Image (spheres, helix red, strand yellow):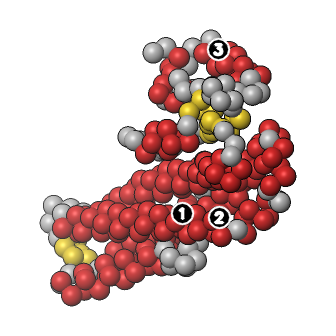
């Protein structure tokens, strides 16, 4: 995500700027001596820490910059669920006025408030981790008397690690918001209109797909079963899978089975390619 990369680059530059504020001179055995006292170190680290919070927590909990991406994903997921359910159920299509009405409804706004709270806590955790790791690299280099250029390179390398971590969090949170929006609309459809649905798991079936994700492809699960599965282990991390509501009869059989049949055929076709997930 370009916005995350830009912000992490800014943080990397801030810590290299902090290094430049520490006077140094060449000592012996290619070591450097840094003229540093506890007060100066505290000021420098506090300034860098403040900047990290300004960059990653921009907008604070009420208008965090990252909410824009989360809200777009949630709207997309809700829209996909709305269209899918409208195609399957005349009762749902008649009862749901429009996508705009769903997005403006109190239940949807309440769900988004919970999403915002979770995402903000995640970002606070990221900010704390970044500050800890960048400060560790800076103080370790100074303590060991490394060449300032070497410390700067180490800071750049650490910023790269933080950037990859941030991008992983971004991908996970965006896809989670999209999936949860589908689950929530599926649950509302059942609660409000008495529909009986199950969620079909649609795996990405890519070369990097995990075996435990691939084997769920084309299988049906209850809304609660899906939520519980994603809450376990690291199933939600870097997951490209999705789910889709399927209208079922009283025995849990799909009322429109052709879609499930196509997904099963897709699984067999992709399995023949010999990806790692298919070999287990």
**Crowding at mark 1 (Cα within 10 Å: few <14, some 14-19, many 20+):** some
- Residue at the spot of label 3: 268
The Cα–Cα distance between marks 2 and 1, rounded to whole angstroms, is 11 Å
Residue appearing at x 51%, y 30% in the figure? 213
| The disc label shown at residue 129, or none | none
At a point 55% along the width and 73% down the height, the residue shown is: 64
Q: Is residue 32 above or below residue 99?
A: below
Element marked by disc 1: helix
Which residue is located at x 59 percent, y 39 percent? 240
Task: Please identify, in this view, whether the residue under mark 3 or under mark 1 is nearer the observer.
Answer: 1
The numbered mark, 3 or 2, whose residue comes first in the sequence reads: 2
Disc ID at residue 115: 1
Q: Name the residue: 53% across, 17% down.
A: 278
Mark 3 Cα shell of 10 Å, populated few (<14), some (14-19), many (≥20)? few
Q: Which residue is under mark 2?
A: 108
Crowding at mark 2 (Cα within 10 Å: few <14, some 14-19, many 20+): some
Quarter the N terminus occupies:
bottom right
Q: Residue furthest top?
A: 272
Label 2 or label 1, whichever lies nearer to me, is 2
Camera-side mark, 3 or 2: 2
Give how far apart the Cα atoms at labels 3 and 1 are: 36 Å
The answer to whether residue 243 is above or below residue 29 is: above
Question: As drawn, is 119 to the left or to the right of 203?
Answer: left
* Residue 235 on image: x %, y %: 45, 40
Q: Do the numbered discs 3 and 2 sit on residues whose CB atoms are within 8 Å?
A: no
């Amino acid at each position: 995500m370009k916005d995350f990369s830009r912000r992490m680059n800014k943080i990397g530059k801030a810590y290299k700027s902090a290094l430049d504020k520490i006077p140094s001179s060449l000592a012996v055995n290619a070591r450097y001596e840094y003229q540093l006292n506890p007060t100066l170190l505290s000021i420098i680290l506090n300034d860098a820490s403040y900047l990290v919070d300004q960059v990653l927590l921009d907008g604070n909990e009420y208008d965090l910059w990252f909410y824009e991406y989360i809200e777009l994903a949630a709207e997309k997921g809700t829209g996909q669920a709305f269209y899918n359910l409208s195609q399957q159920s005349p009762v749902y299509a008649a009862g749901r006025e429009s996508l705009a009405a769903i997005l403006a409804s109190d239940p949807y706004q309440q769900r988004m408030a919970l999403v915002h709270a979770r995402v903000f806590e995640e970002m606070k955790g990221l900010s704390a981790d970044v500050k800890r790791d960048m400060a560790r690299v800076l103080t370790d280099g100074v303590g060991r008397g490394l060449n300032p250029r070497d410390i700067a390179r180490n800071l750049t390398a650490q910023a790269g690690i933080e950037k990859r971590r941030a991008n992983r969090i971004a991908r996970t949170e965006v896809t989670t918001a999209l999936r949860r929006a589908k689950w929530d609309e599926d649950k509302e459809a059942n609660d409000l209109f008495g529909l009986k649905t199950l969620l079909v798991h649609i795996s990405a079936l890519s070369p990097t797909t995990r075996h435990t994700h691939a084997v769920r492809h084309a299988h049906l699960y209850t809304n609660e079963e899906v939520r519980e599965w994603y809450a376990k282990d690291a199933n939600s991390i870097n997951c490209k899978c999705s789910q889709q509501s399927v209208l079922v009869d009283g025995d849990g059989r799909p009322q429109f089975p052709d879609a499930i049949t196509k997904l099963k055929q897709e699984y067999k076709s992709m399995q023949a390619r010999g990806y790692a997930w298919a070999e287990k």
